[in-house]
Amino acid sequence: MTSPRDSILFLSGAGLPAWIWDDVRRDLGDGYETQVASRPDGSKARLRDYAEAAIGSAPAGEFTIVAHSAGGLIGAEITRLVPDRVSAFLGVSAVIPAPGGSFISAMPAPNRWVLSVAMRLAGTRPPDSAIRRGLAHGLTDEVTDRIIADFHSESPHLYRDRIGRGAWSGWRGYVHTTGDRELPLKLQQRCAQRLGAGWHDDLATGHLPMIEDPKAVAGLITRFLDARS
């Protein structure tokens, strides 16, 4: 069973506000100490800056990483910087590149080339129409409007910087979102393999399951942590 007051650090996907985890944190209950990772200021922040900002906002001592989407890269960098503090790692439709890779390199061709050019020309904030069509698929119009209003641009380095090479052997799992229009299931499966996930489960949601079905996400987090023993 989970130990009293397990500590969890939530890592949001690129551009997404901290409140996306509010309902999951509520549904986890008082048995967990939870924090949502901070993001660094400035448009020139490097991947390491993202990882260090997250570490600075993490609960004291050991903690479990629950990483969503591009938060997977930040989580991977955290395990390299402070491996002794990370007790477990759960990816939720998370992007995990190969060792020494980047977010862009984790994408299949030709998507990686299109993404690289699009960011160079238009920046890192997708058009509202793309958010509605992909990222927010499965959500109500009201919630989608809130996502769009609170969505922020990230530093291009979050997508281009390569994660460091390092061995971390903690407990790892992956949640696949089978209705995801943002990160195809086959790509999620490759990311789960790169993570070395020993625990897997699926959710029939879009790319934002923490909003679409927070009770299910909270339940999966609990089962993942219980499975450590």
Image (spheres, rainbow, N blue to C red):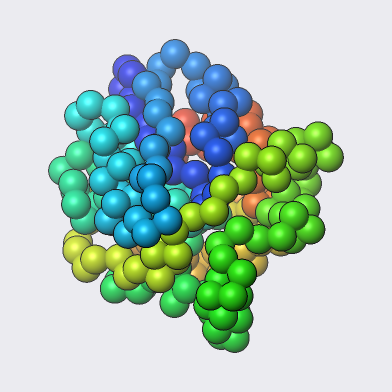
Q: How many discs mark residues in the rendered view?
A: 0
Q: Is residue 211 left or right of residue 140?
A: left
Q: Position of residue 226 (x, y in %)?
A: 40, 33
Q: Can residue 62 be seen in this snapshot?
A: yes
Q: Residue at x 54, y 53 (%)?
A: 153
> Residue 135 is drawn in which quadrant?
bottom right
Observer-nearest of 42 and 18: 42
Is 96 rendered above or below residue 140? below
Q: Can residue 90 be seen in this snapshot?
A: no
Residue at the farthest right position = 141
Q: Is residue 174 left or right of residue 225?
A: right
Q: Residue at x 60, y 81 (%)?
A: 114
Q: Residue at x 23, y 33 (%)?
A: 62
Quadrant of image for the N terminus: top left
Q: Position of residue 65 (x, y in %)?
A: 37, 42
Q: Residue at x 78, y 46 (%)?
A: 138
Observer-nearest of 95 and 12: 12
Q: Is residue 94 left or right of residue 88?
A: right
> Residue 118 is drawn in which quadrant?
bottom right
> Residue 217 is drawn in which quadrant?
top right
Quadrant of image for the C terminus: top left
Is 118 rendered above or below residue 205? below
Residue at the farthest left position = 84
Q: Position of residue 77 (x, y in %)?
A: 28, 56
Q: Position of residue 116 (x, y in %)?
A: 53, 77
Observer-nearest of 50 and 214: 50
